[in-house]
Image (spheres, coloured by chain):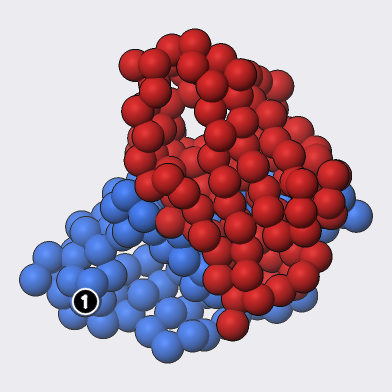
């Protein structure tokens, strides 16, 4: 069966510090991968998606970047965090549009 | 940007009652999906309905889709305290859009009181 792992679960970082959030998927190959951010009490905003190794599409201009160094690994990064980067970050995968997404358990990032 | 708007934003019911929430969207879709999120957790996929389907059932869940009105509804029958969560609708665009992206609505917070 397929599983998705996302870590860390919580993170408190000072303004201006770097960020690296990692997501890995097991039990499948060539998944579509996604990073979403959720503000408190709100819906999800798509940040990045990837349909293959090294292929990254950005949805929202921002202080973040994403990379996919391996087929089942998706990384969200920032060189210098801003207060506005605080939020709940969720990684997800799917095979294609005919299937539901599977989400990771999320990372709650607080920038102080 | 958010594709859908959900109504109501919050819903409080007694255990055993039915809960109904609605979702409206703006552009043509390939499919519409509903997800549940317990507080502080990841989202769980509940049901997917394709644009050529009008109704779908899964256990105590019933989803309808009206593409002419660009709207969908989720009905939870005989609710339980464990159904307390936020429920989100999300759409996949109907045009040949890259990435099979899901666009989410703002969600409905459901509280089921025992």
Q: Quadrant of residue B31?
A: bottom right
Mark 1 — residue?
B80
Q: Residue at x 52, y 60 (%)?
A: A5
Please tell me how crowded label 1 is: few (under 14), some (14-19), or many (20+) other residues with Cα within 10 Å.
some
Question: Where does the image place residue A4, in percent across and percent down from the top left?
Answer: 55, 64
Which residue is drawn at the image coordinates 49% and 85% (left, top)?
A: B58
Q: Nearer the viewer, residue A25 or B103?
A: A25
Residue A58, visible in the rendered structure: yes
- The residue under the point 43% across, 26% down is A86
Looking at the rendered image, the quarter that the N terminus of chain A falls into is bottom right
Q: Colour of chain B?
A: blue
Q: Quadrant of the C terminus of chain A?
A: top left
Residue A46 visible to an observer of this rendering: no
Q: Position of residue A25 (x, y in %)?
A: 63, 64
- Residue sitting at the far bottom: B59
Is A93 placed above or below A14 here?
A: below
Chain A shade: red
């Amino acid at each position: 069966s397929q599983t998705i792992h996302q870590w860390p679960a919580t993170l408190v970082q000072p303004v201006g510090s770097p960020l690296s959030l990692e997501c890995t998927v097991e039990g499948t190959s060539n998944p579509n991968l996604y990073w979403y951010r959720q503000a408190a009490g709100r819906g999800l905003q798509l940040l990045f998606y990837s349909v293959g190794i090294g292929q990254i599409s950005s949805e929202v201009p921002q202080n973040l970047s994403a990379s996919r160094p391996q087929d089942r690994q998706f990384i969200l990064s920032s060189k210098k965090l801003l207060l506005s980067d605080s939020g709940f970050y969720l990684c997800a995968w799917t095979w294609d549009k005919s299937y539901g997404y599977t989400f990771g358990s999320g990372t709650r990032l607080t920038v102080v | 940007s958010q594709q859908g708007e959900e109504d109501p934003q919050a819903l409080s019911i007694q255990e055993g009652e039915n809960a109904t929430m609605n979702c409206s969207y703006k552009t043509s879709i390939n499919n519409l999906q509903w997800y549940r999120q317990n507080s502080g957790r990841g989202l769980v996929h509940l049901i997917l309905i394709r644009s050529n389907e009008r109704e779908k059932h899964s256990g105590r869940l019933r989803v309808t889709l009206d593409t002419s009105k660009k709207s969908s509804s989720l009905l939870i029958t005989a609710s339980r305290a464990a159904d307390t969560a936020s429920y989100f609708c999300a759409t996949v665009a109907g045009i040949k859009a890259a990435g099979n992206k899901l666009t989410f609505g703002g969600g409905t917070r459901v509280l089921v009181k025992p």
